[in-house]
Image: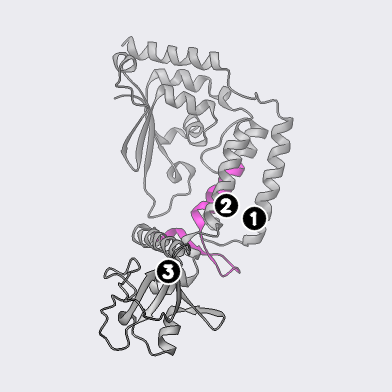
Amino acid sequence: MNIIFKAIVGSQAYGTNTLGSDTDYKGVYVQATHELVGFGYKEQIEISKDECYFEVRRFLQLLQSANPTMLELLFVPEDCIIEKHPAFDLILQHRDKFLTKKCLHSFGGYAIAQIKKAKGLDKKMNWEKDRMVRKSLMDFCFVYQNGKTLPLESFLTENNLDEKRCGLVNLAHFKDCYALYYDVAKQLGYRGIMAENGDNIRLSSVPKGEKDLTILYFNKEGYSSHCKDYQQYTEWLKNRNTQRYVDIQNHGQQIDGKNLLHCQRLLDMALEIAQLKTIIVRRPNAPDLLKIRRGEIDLERFMGKAEEDILKLEELFKNSDLPDEVNKDFVNELLLEVREIVNSE
């Protein structure tokens, strides 16, 4: 891998790193010509979750789309640059040409996405407590009695019935509905309601002439959805970084402070692109961003200000003389020049 650029990115570059922050690296490489014309082309190589490199063609494509992470590489502070080839200097000479009106949607859109991540209704940190408890299949079974429906377990308890002595039979044309029978004398060998693993309904053979007690409905889709949610929740519990979740001041809700930090950072950068036509990676307001991460903010005021900034951005970019997009011929020529410099060595 012929690396032409490598830099420290993320919180270390922004100046928002904390004691437990990782050091992330991103870079650009130029692949050999024989690999480009064959089947060996790799547009991206991930060394680890903290280190990733992009082939120069892919890098320039992402720059054309105003990808925030790639654009930041062009403006990263000098003290974050670990390795730089003269071929990459050629790209840096033209970095301003990659700042276009597309930045409104890339930076602004990413900012909105961070708000949704931080405060989404399904953010697992804010799941209502009963969704965090593993429910039984029985919790999704209901019976019909006296013109009403009630939970199966309540029905069994009220009538002093044993689940293992119940028998279920499919009802034709009634999706997920069953006739429920009961073996009073313990002689009919009914198999109960749940399978041994507890993950499905169990059917029984019922002799002719037996009278059913009631109709049982199994909310199969609800049970499947719960199992999926619970599995995702347990995986999240196992892998989560608890330091990211903070109590928002005067709000009584835990929220992902890192998402809110990035929301503000992206909005600030977008404003700077529209007004100053540059990207300031090392954030001058880093202490304020860290306060946001710690939850030392008024959430409603923060959200209101973010919405105002987004409206302001739309007006600024509309009136800006930034180009609508990067000239494709320019990018193609730049790519060829970079490859020629590297391959001539």
Quarter of the figure with residue 265: top right
Report the Cα–Cα distance between label 3 and label 1.
Answer: 28 Å
Q: Residue at x 51, y 57 (%)?
A: 257
Q: Which residues are magenta?
A: 241-268
Q: Say which of marks 3 and 2 sits in front.
A: 3
For disc 3, the marked residue is 132
User: Dots 3 and 1: beta carbons under 8 Å?
Assistant: no
Q: Is residue 259 magenta?
A: yes
Return the residue nearer the eye: 127 or 305.
127
In this rendering, the answer to whether 121 lies above or below 10 is: below
Quarter of the figure with residue 109: top right
The local crowd at label 2, few if under 14, some if 14 to 19, many if 20 or more residues have their Cα within 10 Å, is many
Quarter of the figure with residue 194: bottom left
Q: Residue at x 53, y 55 (%)?
A: 118
Residue 93: x and y in percent read 51, 20
Q: Is residue 94 visible?
A: yes
The local crowd at label 1, few if under 14, some if 14 to 19, many if 20 or more residues have their Cα within 10 Å, is some
Residue 223: x and y in percent read 42, 65
70 lies left or right of 42:
right
Q: Looking at the rendered structure, which numbered label has been put on residue 115?
A: 2
133 lies left or right of 106:
left
What secondary structure is marked by label 2?
helix
Report the Cα–Cα distance between label 1 and label 2.
Answer: 8 Å
